[in-house]
Image (cartoon, rainbow, N blue to C red):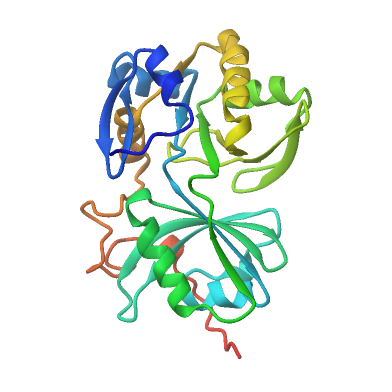
């Protein structure tokens, strides 16, 4: 049976057309794929991307552990920052592309593709050691993506304050005692924000965004428009033409995720 996000009933209420995507039943579109993609470019769109794999890695030497297993340079990443990265196998081919959130010293959140989550969890556990925790939070946490030129205005309205962080950075906030982690990031080449929240609070946050978005012509968006926006932005998709387990990072053109400084690690 297909998995469903905590917002599944909300998608049905909004008339979403659903498709099987990996192990999940997710919205393909609400109105039309092209209309949703154009709205993100002009105003703003809201996506439920809670199917994405969400893995926390923490404990002694978590930083060095991830530095060894990924091919970007974590020494360039500061607490409160995000980094696009790749997990590679022993031959240097791509296992998955991912985003690292540097939560605090030796504590990271890793967002991976849904279809690769189990594989990456196994890979991390295979190479882990005593004192290191690898926690799959995929079905305990939800993930929303608000994208488009008006996204910052909606976030400003729901936070009730000015936004003072930049692209590929995050902050932790509260909305009526509900904790969220919000990053300035996305998959569309537009200004955007991604929100990491406990399942118990996601419907509340979803509704707050929708209510604030009424003033900014917000629309709900599905996987179809997300794929168009990804392609237009030039972002690769694991399993697509560029990224895959037989392809190296350089051949895939993913140079942005390849560290250029050789470091000796104990």
Q: Quadrant of residue 100?
A: bottom right
Left or right: residue 253 compared with residue 77? left
- Label total for image: 0
- Residue toward you, 183 or 206: 206
Q: Is residue 47 above or below residue 260?
A: above
Left or right: residue 71 compared with residue 263? left
Question: Considering the image in quadrants, where does the C terminus appear?
Answer: bottom right
Left or right: residue 133 compared with residue 4? right
- In percent of width and height, residue 233 lies at 37, 40
Residue at point 60% right, 77% down? 64
Q: Is residue 70 visible?
A: no
Q: Quadrant of residue 65?
A: bottom right
- In percent of width and height, residue 85 lies at 47, 62
- Residue toward you, 121 or 157: 121
Q: Quadrant of residue 32?
A: top left
Residue at point 45% right, 16% down? 219
Residue at point 43% right, 36% down? 188
Question: Considering the image in quadrants, where does the N terminus appear?
Answer: top left
- Residue toward you, 156 or 104: 104
- In percent of width and height, residue 235 lies at 36, 47
- In percent of width and height, residue 201 lies at 63, 30
């Amino acid at each position: 049976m297909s998995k469903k996000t905590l917002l599944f009933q909300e998608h049905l209420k909004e008339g979403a057309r659903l498709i099987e995507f990996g192990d999940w039943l997710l919205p393909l579109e609400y109105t039309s794929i092209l209309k949703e993609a154009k709205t993100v470019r002009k105003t703003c769109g809201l996506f439920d991307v809670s199917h994405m794999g969400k893995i926390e890695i923490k404990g002694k030497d978590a930083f060095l552990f991830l530095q060894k297993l990924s091919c970007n340079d974590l020494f360039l990443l500061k607490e409160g920052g995000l980094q696009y990265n790749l997990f590679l196998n022993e031959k240097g081919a791509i296992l998955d592309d991912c985003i690292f959130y540097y939560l605090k010293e030796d504590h990271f959140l890793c967002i991976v593709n849904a279809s690769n989550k189990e594989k990456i969890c196994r890979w991390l556990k295979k190479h882990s050691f005593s004192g290191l925790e690898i926690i799959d939070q995929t079905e305990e946490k939800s993930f929303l993506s608000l994208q488009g030129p008006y996204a910052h205005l909606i976030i400003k309205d729901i936070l009730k304050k000015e936004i003072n962080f930049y692209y590929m950075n995050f902050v932790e906030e509260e909305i009526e005692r509900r904790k969220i982690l919000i990053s300035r990031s996305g998959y569309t080449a537009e200004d955007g924000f991604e929100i990491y929240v406990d399942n118990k609070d996601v419907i509340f946050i979803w509704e707050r965004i929708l209510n604030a978005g009424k003033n900014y012509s917000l629309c709900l968006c599905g996987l179809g428009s997300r794929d168009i926006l990804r392609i237009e932005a030039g972002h690769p998709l694991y399993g697509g033409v560029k990224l895959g387990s037989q392809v190296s990072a350089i051949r895939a053109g993913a140079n942005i995720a390849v560290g250029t400084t050789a470091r000796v690690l104990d």
